[in-house]
Image (cartoon, helix red, strand yellow):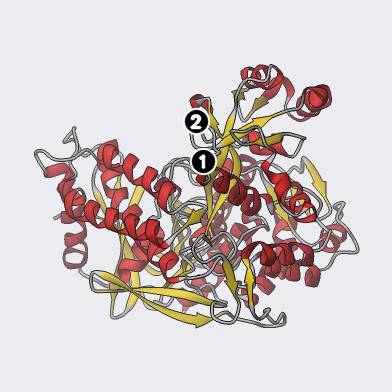
Amino acid sequence: MALQELKTDVLVIGAGGAGFRAAIEARQRGARALLVSKGPLARCGATSLAGADLTADGRGLAEIGLPGEPRDSQETWFRDIVHQGFFLNNQRLVEIYVQEAVQRVKELLDWGLKVRSSDQRAVYTTGTHIADILFRRAKAVGVEVVEDVMVLDLVVKDGGVVGAVGLDLHSGEFVVFKAKAVVLATGGWHKAYTPTTGTMELSGDGVAMAYRAGAELANMEFVTFCCSILFWPPRWRGSLFTYILQGMGAVLTNRDGERFLEKYDPAMAKIGTSTEWDKAFVSFASAQEVRAGKGSPHGGVFFGIEPEAWDAFDRQVEAHYPKWRYKGTDFSELRRMLREGEPVEVGPAAEYFEGGISINEHFAASLPGLYAAGECAAALFGANRVAAATTEMLVTGALAGRFAAEYASRTECPEFAEGREAEAVCAKAMQPLARPGGISPVEVKRRIQEMAYEKLGPVRTEREIREFLAFLEEVKEDALPWLCTRSKSPRYNRDWIEALELENVVQVLEISARSALARTESRGVHYRADCPHADNDRWLREIVVKQAGDAPSMNLRPVVVTTLEPPKGVVPYLEMMKRMMEAHSDVGGPH
């Protein structure tokens, strides 16, 4: 099998913010860097969709000339992030994050970042603006780029990662990448859920291929759901616009017209609706209403504005989003519906994945030569992310690129026979294309997404998780081996791409579900209705997963503690959340 071959020092897989920043850093440190993008450069992945807030400690922002809060400090921000993560964070990674953040923000300013607004601990811009800046910088320093190539699997030789095998989506031809070091920056697995706030090319590829290569994964049970995402009308399903409007005075009610958030502790509800704690708190509360049979017809809750508050609300929205346009979409019809009291339904949607590839403080995975950055890496945010993922991608990307370049500088160029290492990957990838008949991957995908949301959503139980695992076994036995494409052309065949992504989706969902089943407590964004307590004595440990034959093996390891000692005792979930909220400083302001 004739294969195109590309060689480099540092291969970066994933062209969002983390991938671009890793490639830039590797190149600036003297390494040859090749960036591989699954979609259009600077427009695929999560970065271009981001809001986007870049967070750093307020004092640091003030010191570089931005209007940050001078009473803030890196130590205060560190404590906030650890409390937000319910003490499951790797505290060494948090220290690195808060120490590096302001430098990464200043760097973007030096490269041309335009700040739209700011508050005590953040500056605001757009995700597309950040992506464009990083793209320009990458070209300026000489990063090589390849777009519209889906990387299928890593190549491992003598226990270390030495490259990867990819598929050129335009030509349908396979590509072998040979590299001294590989950085995975492939984001989360948003495609596994519906609804989701992410893009559909985020199918857990990097996490799945790292697992198949033998790397350890961690914290896979933790999935952040963004609250108050549009469910109905269906044309706007998945939009973040109502989440943004929630902070301007919107009211959430259940089927009976009750303001269900009022049943919770007032102080907790205030923090949980006026800051980014809302993702964990309001998603939990909304899901509980649905499970109690008080949800809206399409699986959410109702979103509205009190008539007496309408004028002030409308002026506020117009000030930020003239003519009710958000990211190019005209929401004037939503304005009419809200003004006239027509039903608008919202609910939680999968947004961020705290788990992923297990890394150390050098952002190295458990396999030599493999590094990870951004959302596909685990442990920085513990059990709940409140701090900005946009800052995370810059900090972790820069450091992963730095350490990958250092590794490459002391490593010989890999030599492997691509015929042996790549042929099995290519042959397996060809099966859906070569199969004369079978099952449509689109049909299977939709059922997986619906089941994942139903059984592995914001609220879980042992019974539901076991039902989901049984469902995944059926998919693995009765669907994946029979996936086929309608068109047999290898050139940009959407069905073929869907089929290849489904294996990754199923793999990461199974690991996530098994981890959720193993964690018999509730912590952060993992809520077990049948285990409604945070068990600080038994469960301040990470679940680490590694491939063992056809099934994952699971082990526990203590969290990395540097300065903040975790709490002790078994505490009701909501009480634990309240304690973490109250321990959070008032620096940073509302979201």
Residue 429 left/right relative to 37? left
Going by the numbered disc 1, the residue's amino acid type is: Gly
Going by the numbered disc 2, the residue's amino acid type is: Pro
Query: Residue 521 appears at what percent x and percent y?
Result: 52, 69
Q: How many C-alpha atoms fall within 10 Å of the one at disc 2: few (<14), some, or many (≥20)? A: few
Give the quarter of the figure containing the N terminus: bottom left
Q: Which label lies toward us, 1 or 2?
A: 1
Residue shown at 65% from the left, 32% from the top: 257
Residue shown at 37% from the left, 47% from the top: 451
Foreground of the two, 470 or 117? 470
Query: Residue 292 appears at what percent x and percent y?
Result: 53, 45
Question: Pointers 1 and 2 in contact (CB under 8 A)?
Answer: no
Residue 91 visible? The answer is yes
- 292 in relation to 330, above or below: below
Element on which disc 1 rests: loop
Residue 306 left/right relative to 435? right
Q: How many C-alpha atoms fall within 10 Å of the one at disc 1: few (<14), some, or many (≥20)? A: few
Residue shown at 18% from the left, 33% from the top: 486
Q: Which residue is mark 1?
A: 293
Query: Residue 454 appears at what percent x and percent y?
Result: 42, 47
Q: Quadrant of residue 95?
A: bottom right
Residue 360 visible? The answer is no
Q: Which residue extends farthest left?
A: 436
Query: Residue 99 appears at what percent x and percent y?
Result: 72, 70
Q: CA distance from mark 1 to mark 2?
A: 10 Å
Residue 282 left/right relative to 205? right
Q: Which mark is residue 140?
A: none
Foreground of the two, 75 or 157? 75
- 561 in relation to 14, above or below: below
Q: Which mark is residue 297?
A: 2
Q: Quadrant of residue 7?
A: bottom left
Element on which disc 2 rests: loop
